[in-house]
């Protein structure tokens, strides 16, 4: 089972790299604006996606100027935000996204677009959206259902893509 999971995960990472390459570059450019200026890159993750903020702030190689977004933080115009959720229609993530729009704070979102979002999903609200493309589990089980839904692993893959690109941009800057 682990070998099949590894194969499927490798395929997912390859698809994300190929299909979201330009969105990752665009997202990194937007987030790098904060790191290059006087701002911070704030991260907000729902549920298991909090792992991305924890990695960015407390990981072995933290993201420059990164901080976890909380209700107590007063954002400045130079700040940028990365919102990460399992799905683009997550109510908690949408509330944060609307708040960013009202404050005029540019933001990047990472989530899976599934079905219709009625024009109000992270994919339509974000300045840059990166689609996780995880609409079902990676493996079939004995009953014909799909299991193994590693959204946080996929989001961490995207996060590292953003981080590497931000660092490249800042080196050139």
Image (cartoon, rainbow, N blue to C red):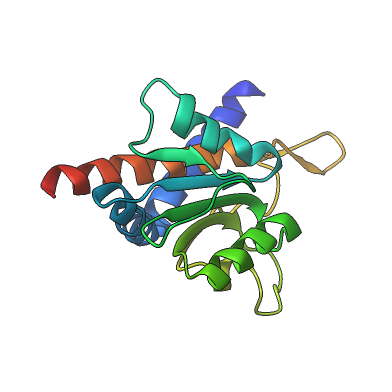
x and y percentages locating residue 50 in the rendered image: 62, 37
Asked if residue 54 is positioned above or below residue 172 in the image, the reply reads above
Q: Nearer the viewer, residue 126 or 133?
A: 126
At which x and y percent is residue 168?
20, 44
* Residue at far right of view: 143
Q: Quadrant of residue 98?
A: bottom right
Determine if residue 6 is in view: yes
Q: Position of residue 85 (x, y in %)?
A: 63, 50
Q: Residue at x 38, y 57 (%)?
A: 27
The quadrant in which residue 94 appears is: bottom right
Q: Quadrant of the N terminus?
A: top right
Name the residue at the left extreme: 172
13 vs 122, left or right, is: left
- Using residue 67 as the reference point, say whether residue 85 is left or right of it: right
Front-most of residues 157 and 104 = 104
In this rendering, is residue 50 above or below 124?
above
Residue 117 pos. (x, y %): 70, 73
Residue lying at 12% horizontally and 47% vertically, measured from the top left: 172
Of residues 29 and 37, the one drawn nearer to the viewer in this rendering: 37
Image point 54% across, 31% down: which residue?
54
Above or below residue 108? Residue 5 is above
Query: Which residue is pictured at 75% across the width and 60% down the height?
Result: 91
How many numbered callouts?
A: 0
């Amino acid at each position: 089972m682990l070998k099949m999971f590894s194969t499927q995960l490798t395929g997912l990472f390859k698809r994300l790299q190929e299909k979201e390459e330009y969105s990752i570059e665009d997202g990194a450019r937007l987030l790098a604006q904060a790191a290059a200026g006087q701002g911070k890159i704030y991260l907000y993750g729902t549920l298991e996606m909090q792992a991305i903020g924890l990695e960015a702030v407390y990981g072995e190689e933290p993201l420059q100027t990164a901080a976890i977004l909380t209700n107590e933080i007063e954002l400045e115009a130079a700040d940028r935000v990365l919102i990460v959720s399992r799905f683009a229609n997550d109510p908690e993530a949408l509330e944060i996204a609307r708040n960013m729009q009202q404050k005029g704070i540019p933001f990047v979102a990472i989530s899976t677009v599934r079905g219709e979002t009625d024009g109000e999903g992270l994919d339509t609200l974000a300045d840059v959206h990166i689609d996780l493309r995880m609409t079902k589990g990676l493996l079939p089980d004995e009953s014909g259902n799909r299991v193994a839904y590693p959204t946080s692993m996929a989001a961490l893959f995207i996060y590292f893509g953003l981080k590497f690109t931000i660092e490249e941009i800042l080196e050139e800057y």
